[in-house]
Image (cartoon, rainbow, N blue to C red):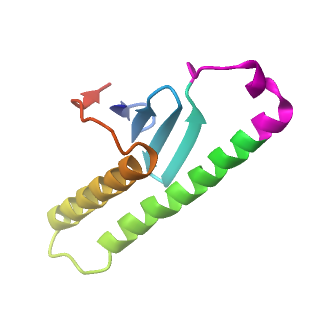
Amino acid sequence: KDVALVRSTRESTTRLVLEFGKAFTMTVYLTPLLVQIHPHPNAPKSEDWQSPTLEHVIQERLEYAQAHTTKVLRECFGAAHLRPYANDFELEISEAAALLQFLQLARQTFMPNWKDKELTVK
């Protein structure tokens, strides 16, 4: 239920980090357009989760979600580039709208009861 905009001056990159409760963390890289999904480091664990079979199934599901989410992100940005733009400002507005559309889809898919909080810049 948390989101942070992370800027790296060393790497000249910007990424969004979304925490979906204590379940998983989604990192959205803007260059290249890529999504990574990992179990939250403080996710509750039980003895059942320690079995290699269950761990393998969870990892496969996270990899599938990661691939599908990356595809959706790229579709949102691809749609933003379908028409010509008069200037860079119009293109940037279109890309911002694509990012907002992606975030809305992610919220609806992974956590429909999400409540907005203020964006923090780290």
**Residue 53 belongs to the span the image colors magenta:** yes
Whether 19 is drawn above or below 33: the answer is: above
Q: Is residue 13 visible?
A: no
Q: Give the residue at the far bottom of this rendering.
A: 83
Which quadrant holds the N terminus? top left
**Range of magenta residues:** 41-56
Q: Is residue 84 visible?
A: yes
Left or right of 69? Residue 97 is: left
Say which residue appears at 44% left-offset and 34% top-offset: 20
Residue 111 is drawn in which quadrant? top left
Q: Is residue 43 magenta?
A: yes
Horizontal side, residue 113 vs residue 73: left or right: left
| Viewer-side residue, 58 vs 63 | 58
Residue 78 location (% of width, % of height): 39, 71
Q: Is residue 122 above or below residue 11?
A: above
> What residue is drawn where x is 56% and y is 59%?
68
